[in-house]
Amino acid sequence: MALPKLNDTPKYELHVPSTGQKVRFRPYLVKEEKILMVAMESQDVNQIVNAISDTISACVVDDIDIEKLKMFDVEYMFTQIRGKSVGETSELNMPCEKCEEGNQVFIKYDDIKIDMPEEVSDIIPITDSIKLKMSWPSFRKLMSQFNDMKEFNTDLAFKTLVVCIDSIMTEDEIFHMSDHTEEEANEFIESLTTAQLGNVREYLEAMPRLTYNIEFDCSNCSTHNTKELSGIQDFF
């Protein structure tokens, strides 16, 4: 007689932040958690991207195009799936900013939210005759810019800017960035003035981010600590 099957029925729902699409999902299983843990420990970006993408694909039972999910979509969906998989709260060991003593703190997955901006223009004037068409990058497209998670944490801002530019529009032509090399894209960005770059940064700063604020008093020195968690690596 075959053993009974577990966890076949999806029990939860979430809304994809960038589209508002409602999808059903199930918690991830032990076999999927093992793959995720190995990927996170490896610090290899390709392995992490594939593990997270495969987990979301396996757990979300409704039709969804993983390749089109934005960075913040994946971060939010993954933490919601993780919350239903490991429990409503998760324990983290946070070092004190003063004495570096480790402290036990808890995060509540149900409290993690992403606030979508009401309206953000994706057309940015650079000069009187040149405009940029912007687009928030997909998770896979952004992560493809990095070799490891250390590089991701240090070079995120500039490389996010590179992949956010969809095209450069002049009065006569449209130059799609997908038709040009990374070196050409970098050269164009480096030719911007500080003021022009500031206009582009406003678009980046409006991009939704997965964040969670933690406050705790150190058990060793009583210092009050405030820390912002952001990104999948902080919640895993």
Image (spheres, rainbow, N blue to C red):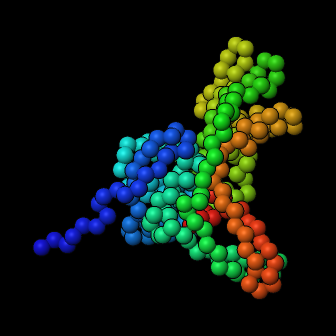
Where is residue 163 shown, x and y percent of the image? Answer: 65, 40
Q: Residue at x 36, y 50 (%)?
A: 61
Q: Is residue 189 above or below residue 214?
A: above
Q: Residue at x 63, y 54 (%)?
A: 210
Which residue is farthest left?
Answer: 1
Tell whether 159 sits left or right of 47. Answer: right
Q: Which quadrant holds residue 3?
A: bottom left
Q: Quadrant of the N terminus?
A: bottom left
Task: Work out whether residue 57 can be spotted.
Answer: no
Where is residue 86 shown, x and y percent of the image? Answer: 47, 70
Q: Is residue 16 above or below residue 102?
A: above
Q: Is residue 210 above or below residue 227?
A: above
Q: Closest to the observer: 167 or 75? A: 75
Q: Residue at x 58, y 48 (%)?
A: 71
Which residue is farthest right?
Answer: 194
Q: Quadrant of the C terminus?
A: bottom right
Tell whether 67 sits left or right of 182. Answer: left
Q: Closest to the observer: 120 or 173? A: 120
Instruction: Give the number of callouts.
Output: 0
Which residue is farthest top?
Answer: 172
